[in-house]
Amino acid sequence: MTQRRLVVMGVVGAVVAVVALRYFVWLDLGGRCVIGLRPSLVGYDNTTIKRALATLQRGSPEDYRKVCAHVAWINPNPSCGGFGGGCFWHSEGNRGRASVDISTEHGLIWTIAILVHETSHAVQYHEGRPPKFDLEHECYGEDDRILRALVQFE
Amino acid sequence: MKRYAIIAVIALVLLWGWLRAFAWFDPVRFCRIHIDVELLEGDRAPIREAIALVRREDPLAYQALCRWVDRIQEERQCDAGDPQADPRLRGQPVFTPGAVDAALLRAREAPGCYVRGSRIIVLRRAPEGGGSPALVRERADALKRLAGYSQAFWSGGPR
């Protein structure tokens, strides 16, 4: 392998690593928190998710710790929650740290709210709550609480 | 030598354009604030006008804005709570004023809000044909106030 080819491969590898770190991974070594971000197909890039995580990290550390403990993957594409909503699936694959669907359609504020809402479902699932339990009411309360805590308008 | 000078000038122009295209950029005061608007309908110009107004009339507030805010986003509204937390309102597209917490309605009508834990100010999306002097004035006042909230959060002042 020529030296030139090695340099080219090194540059390509570095670019791939930078893009992956910027768009597809939330990495917080100090907080021991790594979350994968799936590629977004609708043009709302993953940096909104990262901004939401960064805001929670500083604005509500307790909620941030819950996200880190219960969520392994975030899918920013619309799913059962549609545009502007989110989803948590009760499935075997989510027994460990879960995958949650979080649309970023409505911007930072709602992305934070949905993240806290779906994390609340992950917590419920990991705590073994029965599927027919009134799961939604508690989680709407959680997203309401975080919006009231973080959004300052007057 | 001349070739390098031309390349340097082109690079500088590109850098200047990149720094300015999606942001408020004031190199003299070392101030750059990213501005996010709706991809197709959004317009950064009225937001830039509001920032320029803050710079003209209140240097201290402008300094706070530059130091404590790194991004201004236009969103449909500020939501300071989720009306769906009340089971009676779940699934309703429109809320009647009496049924919803008054603070939530005030937040939705507010020109903007600060999101604690960030350096981000959210401005309510301008109505159709936005950019009037009244809107610029309203936003300038909001930017001053909200930059103060960010400063208070990050400098550990009263919250």
Image: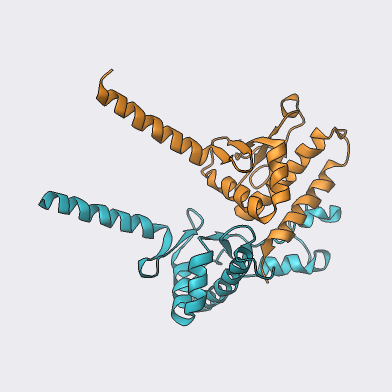
Chain colours: A orange, B cyan
The image shows residue B60 at horizontal and vertical percentages of 50, 77
Please indicate whether residue B11 sits to the left or right of residue B154 in the image: left
Q: Is residue B82 above or below residue B25?
A: above
Q: In the image, what residue occupies the spot 63% across and 65% down?
A: B153
Q: Is residue A106 above or below residue B102?
A: above
Q: Is residue A61 above or below residue B56?
A: above
Q: Is residue B96 above or below residue A133?
A: below
The image shows residue A147 at horizontal and vertical percentages of 71, 57
Looking at the rendering, in which quadrant would you find the C terminus of chain B?
bottom right
All told, the count of numbered labels is: 0
Residue at far bottom of view: B57
Q: Nearer the viewer, residue B138 or A92?
A: A92
Q: Nearer the viewer, residue B81 or A56?
A: A56
Q: In the image, what residue occupies the spot 36% across and 66% down?
A: B27
The image shows residue A2 at horizontal and vertical percentages of 25, 20
Q: In the image, what residue occupies the spot 60% across and 50% down?
A: A54
Residue at far top of view: A1
Q: In the image, what residue occupies the spot 71% across and 38% down?
A: A69
Quarter-of-image position of residue B56: bottom left
Quarter-of-image position of residue B113: bottom right
Residue at far left of view: B2
Quarter-of-image position of residue B5: bottom left
Please indicate whether residue B21 sits to the left or right of residue A150 in the image: left
